[in-house]
């Protein structure tokens, strides 16, 4: 099902890339003509693509640090597709269609992957709600069990208040 | 020596097992001779592990390539310095090193506490020896560093070039010190559960060990960042690699524990929570090494995959979880809170919130690390989870945590009044908002960066004002000068003020992270005499002029060095070099970057491509062209400064109080006074 949706997305993206007016507006270039440091689209795409040489880095970073044959080849492909006027989303979609989602540095926000993005926040929110509920319940129950534990005179109470005021002052 | 080392391991295992049994049995039956025997077993195992470690080092220094471990991690040309660090360079040796450090801490703990904490010590020895026995089982049955090859190769494969740096002698041992030191609070926690003495005594006994473990973990993580930044040469310092994450997890839960334990000490609350946090943190220290060694997750740090090790680790972690959960349930009656949180606007609630967020952060990191496995299990699809994922999930959590760093220490215990909130937070909020406005006006548009700087300013204002108010009050009451009042203020309550200094360090580190959003990066192919310019986000311009490439042979490597003269706004400021190193034993070259570091930014030079390496080796003038990647990394140095501040703060907090101050500790402080008032209410 998920694979079917992905194929459909790629197909739509490919059709869009061919039919969109933007395609007609971008003049065809050679890959070498695209300066990766002048064209922000290159870094944008390459920093989303994971190199499979084992470095775990994105191809933008890997090709400039590692002696790796994979990331320069992937980068050349990215620049070639951009030079041909292909949209960045389509370039990414092509890589995913070819190599699966492991080629992405982060899973796309769809299907089960939402659990990855949302569960930590849901867990924290749930913990806060549960703890807040417990605190509220206990604070309602508590006064009955306290109060007469220590017999303190008014004078002692006044001294305590003065001490606390001094502490607050010091803090 | 090497043979002796192997025998030492085999002797240490039965002694650990026997000593563990005697410790638990001695604690239960209160038989002194059993307890003494268990405690002596700790010392004997430590001595035996010293012999085993010396045996491994001797095998490296003597080039004994008949041993699989030496043949795989050393070679004849390897510098002596790195041969010694071979002890922890690979999986097999590092497990022995781990056990050695654990045995060292166990021995020190037994020495320091055998008279003071008689009730706990039999169980403490038992726990230590059980953990030691576990590591010895792993070493002897799944990762023996003394395993022999059927033949002795003439030379070894050599050490991974990226490990051949002085950081190798600093970063792993520091992390291991942090991991192993946390066994002490864990052992006392289990001892408290077994003995039933669940008052605050075990907390006070282990307070400094917890801080020491936290301190080593924090420094180990920062050293690792520095290593990555200097050595890996991609311009970053943290990549959310699974093994990086594994070292962060126990640090996060230990940080939560360090805060929540104050609630227990002051108000007798969160006893079960603290016990659970100690167990969880210990389990995460074991999980960290499990993740590195099991091959469960793909990582650049991973040792060779070994399913046997994975199985033994899982069994141990499962056993610890089951036993500790059972003990906590058994003692749940004694772990009830003596008080309760009365208001959401109180220090207790803020600390509890801090705990929830820290645990939430730990969960987010763990969840992201394991998410590829979980996804494959659930959907059958393979995915990768990298920095974009972790940043999206963890930055918002980190920002809440940063804000709580400022809120927690100044909000009142029990219940904050409106006046307390106004008095403590009006100025910091104004300063924080001012910082955000200033940055917006200056052109800052990255939302997370703006929020980070704003919250950092908020927290710093709170901390600085706390120091100022404390120093002023002390100066007024004791008629001391301000500098002397400041020093005495800090030394009289090292834990509190040391903690504030740690918070300043944390703020600096967060600000450094936010600085990343202003990174600048260019790449140029330059022939000698050609220049590249790069404009800093602070407005000035650097010009780097290629002076040429030189090459020469060094010990076990061939080096190509590029030198570039550097000027800032037209003024010469020196020369920056970057190298490619071609190790004789490695397939791929490594890069040594050139870094010009200043308070506000680093200029980071990477020799990316040497276009004609053979021509350079021949000193051919036509072969001098090279490609350089030049980065400006704003505020990176603040991570190292932050680490330093954090270290100072932690050392102040760990440093033993003067005897007089220790006596004063027994006098109820603010928390106790408020308790009395609460009771009177």
Image (tube, rainbow, N blue to C red):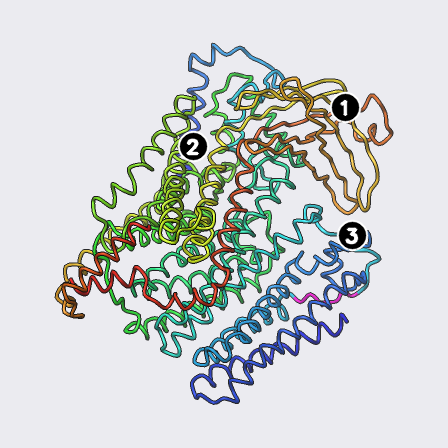
Image height check: is B242 above or below B444? below
Q: Position of residue B41 (x, y in %)?
A: 58, 80
Residue nearest the observer in this picture, B417 or B443 = B417
Q: Position of residue B40 (x, y in %)?
A: 58, 81
Which stretch did the figure color magenta?
B144-150
Crowd band around label 3 with a 10 angstrom C-alpha radius: few (<14), some (14–19), many (20+): some
- According to the picture, the residue beneath numbered tag 3 turns out to be B79
**How far separated are the C-alphas under marks 1 and 3?**
31 Å
Dot 2: element: helix
Image height check: is B644 above or below B617? below
Question: In the image, is A111 to the left or to the right of B629?
Answer: left
- Residue in the image at 53% along x and 24% along y: B538
Image height check: is B294 above or below A43? below
Q: Earlier in the sequence, mark 1 or mark 3?
A: 3
| Outermost residue, left side | A144
Tell which subunit mark 3 falls on.
B
Q: Is residue A1 visible?
A: no
The answer to whether marks 1 and 2 sit on the same chain is: yes
Question: In the image, is A26 to the left or to the right of B400?
Answer: right
Figure quadrant of the N terminus of chain A: top left
In contact (CB < 8 Å): disc 3 and disc 2: no
In contact (CB < 8 Å): disc 1 and disc 2: no
Dot 3: element: loop
- According to the picture, the residue beneath numbered tag 1 turns out to be B547
**How far separated are the C-alphas under marks 1 and 2?**
37 Å
Q: Earlier in the sequence, mark 1 or mark 2?
A: 2
- Residue in the image at 42% along x and 61% along y: B280
Tell me, yes or no, whether the highlighted magenta stretch contains residue B148.
yes
- According to the picture, the residue beneath numbered tag 2 turns out to be B449
Dot 1: element: strand
Crowd band around label 2 with a 10 angstrom C-alpha radius: few (<14), some (14–19), many (20+): many
């Amino acid at each position: 099902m998920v694979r079917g949706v992905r194929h459909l997305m790629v197909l739509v993206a490919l059709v869009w890339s061919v039919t969109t007016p933007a395609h007609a507006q971008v003049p065809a270039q050679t890959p070498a003509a695209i300066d990766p440091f002048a064209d922000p689209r290159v870094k944008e795409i390459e920093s989303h693509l994971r190199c499979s040489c084992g470095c775990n880095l994105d191809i933008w970073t890997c090709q400039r640090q590692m002696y790796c044959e994979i990331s320069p080849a992937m980068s050349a492909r990215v620049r070639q597709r951009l030079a041909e006027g292909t949209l960045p989303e389509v370039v990414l979609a092509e890589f995913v269609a070819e190599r699966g989602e492991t080629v992405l540095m982060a899973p796309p926000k769809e299907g089960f992957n939402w659990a990855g993005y949302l569960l930590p926040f849901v867990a924290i929110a749930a913990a806060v709600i549960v703890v807040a509920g417990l605190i509220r319940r206990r604070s309602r129950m508590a006064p009955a069990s306290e109060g007469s534990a220590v017999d303190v005179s008014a004078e002692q109470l006044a001294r305590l208040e003065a001490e606390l005021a001094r502490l607050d002052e010091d803090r | 020596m090497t043979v002796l080392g192997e025998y030492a391991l085999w002797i240490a295992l039965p002694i650990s097992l026997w000593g563990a049994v005697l410790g638990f049995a001695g604690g239960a039956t209160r038989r002194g001779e059993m307890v003494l025997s268990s405690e002596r077993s700790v010392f004997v195992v430590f001595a035996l592990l010293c012999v085993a470690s010396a045996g491994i080092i001797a095998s490296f220094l003597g080039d004994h390539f008949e041993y699989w471990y030496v043949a795989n991690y050393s070679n004849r040309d390897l510098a002596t310095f790195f041969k010694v660090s071979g002890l922890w360079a690979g999986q097999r040796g590092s497990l022995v090193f781990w056990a050695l450090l654990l045995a060292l801490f166990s021995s020190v703990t037994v020495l320091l506490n055998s008279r003071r904490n008689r009730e706990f010590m039999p169980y403490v020895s038992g726990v230590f020896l059980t953990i030691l026995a576990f590591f010895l089982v792993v070493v002897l049955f799944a990762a023996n560093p003394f395993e022999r090859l059927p033949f002795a190769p003439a030379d070894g494969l050599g050490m991974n070039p990226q490990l051949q740096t002085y950081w190798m002698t600093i970063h792993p041992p520091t992390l291991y010190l942090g991991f192993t030191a946390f066994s002490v609070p864990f052992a006392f926690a289990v001892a408290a559960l077994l003995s039933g003495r669940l008052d605050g005594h075990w907390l006070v006994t282990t307070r400094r060990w917890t801080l020491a473990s936290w301190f080593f973990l924090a420094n180990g993580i920062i050293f690792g960042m520095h290593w990555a930044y200097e050595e890996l040469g991609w311009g970053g310092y943290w990549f959310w690699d699974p093994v990086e994450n594994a070292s962060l997890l126990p640090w996060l839960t230990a940080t939560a524990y360090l805060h929540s334990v104050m609630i227990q000490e002051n108000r007798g609350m969160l006893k079960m929570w603290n016990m659970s946090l100690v167990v969880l943190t210990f389990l995460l220290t074991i999980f960290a090494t499990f993740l590195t060694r099991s091959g469960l997750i793909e990582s650049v740090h991973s040792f060779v995959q070994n399913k046997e090790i994975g199985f033994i680790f899982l069994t141990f972690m499962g056993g610890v979880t089951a036993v500790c959960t059972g003990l906590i349930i058994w003692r749940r009656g004694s772990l009830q809170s003596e008080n309760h949180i009365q208001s959401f606007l109180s220090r207790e609630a803020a600390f509890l919130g801090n705990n929830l967020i820290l645990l939430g952060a730990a969960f987010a990191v763990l969840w992201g690390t394991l998410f590829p496995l979980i996804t494959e299990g659930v959907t059958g699809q393979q995915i990768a989870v990298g920095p974009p994922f972790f940043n999206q999930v963890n930055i918002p959590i980190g920002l809440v945590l940063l804000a709580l760093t400022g809120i927690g220490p100044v909000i009142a215990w029990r219940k904050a009044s409106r006046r307390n909130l106004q008095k403590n937070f009006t100025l910091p909020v104004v300063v924080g908002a001012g910082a955000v406005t200033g940055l917006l006006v200056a052109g800052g548009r990255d939302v997370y960066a703006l929020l980070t700087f704003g919250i950092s300013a908020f927290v710093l204002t709170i901390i600085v004002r706390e120091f100022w108010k404390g120093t002023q009050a002390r100066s007024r009451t004791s008629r001391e000068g301000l500098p002397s009042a400041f020093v005495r203020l800090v030394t009289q309550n090292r834990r509190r003020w040391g903690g504030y200094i740690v918070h300043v360090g944390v703020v600096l580190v967060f600000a450094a992270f936010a600085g990343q959003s202003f990174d600048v990066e260019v790449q140029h192919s330059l022939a000698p005499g050609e220049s590249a310019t790069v404009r800093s986000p602070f407005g000035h311009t650097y010009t780097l002029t290629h002076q040429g490439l030189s090459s020469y042979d060094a010990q076990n490597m061939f080096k190509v060095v590029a030198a570039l003269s550097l000027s800032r706004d037209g003024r010469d400021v020196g020369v920056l070099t970057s190298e490619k190193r071609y190790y004789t034993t490695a397939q791929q070259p490594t890069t040594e970057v050139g870094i010009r570091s200043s308070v506000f930014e680093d200029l980071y030079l990477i020799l990316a491509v040497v276009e004609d390496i053979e021509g350079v080796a021949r000193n051919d003038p036509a072969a001098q062209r090279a490609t350089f990647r030049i980065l400006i990394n704003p505020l990176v140095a603040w991570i190292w400064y932050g680490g330093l501040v954090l270290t100072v703060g932690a050392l102040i907090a760990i440093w033993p109080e003067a005897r007089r101050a220790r006596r004063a500790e027994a006098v109820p402080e603010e928390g106790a006074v408020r308790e009395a008032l609460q009771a009177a209410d």
